[in-house]
Image (cartoon, coloured by chain):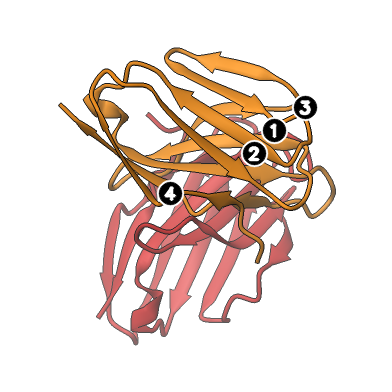
Chain colours: A orange, B red
């Protein structure tokens, strides 16, 4: 099935640094979602975006729904060790048989 | 803490065993989902239930059999699984399928097939 484009596969940053990751698609989505998954746990919803151009924050996290509706980015500011994990973007369309389309995920490592 | 509860957390079974995975949510959500996830990969959709009726079956082998006894519960019955079925099985729920409300995931059942 279709996957969203998320790259690189891994990112390594120093504690305190900001990091930005983006997600692109060849087709339009009505909703963009960002999830974080820690080892041994399920994905946890970080931010949901519902409108093109929307910019939403959740603590140190900021995400934007691209104006073309084909992309989204997530920014983490002042990273801390517990930011380590896999970050998945997901797109969703409305409709009777809608499903989530996931990116491949980015594994974030934070050096203390 | 997740509001979608999955049991058991870990399961080891032989290829001839029959077992069931359970999922429960009390958020009043009317859509529930089963996903399979391999290490370092995104979740792959298996089944969707909408208002307790099977809405989507992503061509999943019949050795996996879903059941939705009521709007809060979702089961996945397993029989004669293969070693390649070893994975993390995630349950999720949302207000309704087709709405723009996000899915919320449980912590999964780690399944190992011997």
Give x and y (percent) for residue B105: 49, 42
Residue where numbered disc 3 is placed = A52
- Whether pointer 2 and pointer 1 mark residues with C-beta atoms closer than 8 Å, the reply is yes
Residue where numbered disc 1 is placed = B101
Where is residue B106, by image quadrant?
top left
Residue where numbered disc 2 is placed = B94
> What is the chain identity of the residue bearing mark 3?
A
> What is the chain identity of the residue bearing mark 1?
B
Relative height, residue A28 to residue B3 (above, below): below
Residue located 65% across and 66% down the image: A1
Crowd rating for badge 4 (residues with CA inside 10 Å; few <14, some 14–19, many 20+)? few
- Whether pointer 4 and pointer 3 mark residues with C-beta atoms closer than 8 Å, the reply is no
Residue where numbered disc 4 is placed = A8
Residue at disc 3, secondary structure? loop
Residue at disc 2, secondary structure? strand
Badge nearest the viewer, 2 or 1: 1
Relative height, residue B11 to residue A43 (above, below): below
Give x and y (percent) for residue A110: 24, 32
């Amino acid at each position: 099935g279709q996957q969203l484009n998320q790259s690189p596969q891994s990112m390594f940053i120093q504690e305190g640094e900001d990091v930005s990751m983006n997600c692109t698609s060849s087709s339009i989505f009505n909703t963009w979602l960002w999830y974080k998954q820690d080892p041994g746990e399920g994905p946890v919803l970080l931010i949901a975006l519902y409108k093109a151009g929307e910019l939403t924050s959740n603590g140190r996290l900021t995400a934007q729904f691209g104006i073309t509706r084909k992309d989204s980015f997530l920014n983490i500011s002042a990273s801390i060790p517990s930011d380590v994990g896999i970050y998945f973007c997901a797109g969703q369309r409305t409709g009777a048989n809608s499903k989530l389309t996931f990116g491949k995920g980015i594994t974030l490592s934070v050096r203390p | 803490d997740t509001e979608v509860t999955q049991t058991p957390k870990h399961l080891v079974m032989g290829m001839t065993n029959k077992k069931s995975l359970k999922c429960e949510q009390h958020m009043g959500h009317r859509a529930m989902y089963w996903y399979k996830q391999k290490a370092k990969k995104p979740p792959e959709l298996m089944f969707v239930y909408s208002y307790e009726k099977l809405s989507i079956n992503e061509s999943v082998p019949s050795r996996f059999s879903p059941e939705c006894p009521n709007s809060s519960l979702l089961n996945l019955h397993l029989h004669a699984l293969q070693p390649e079925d070893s994975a993390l099985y995630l349950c999720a729920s949302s207000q309704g399928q087709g709405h723009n409300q996000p899915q919320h995931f449980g912590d999964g059942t780690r399944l190992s097939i011997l």
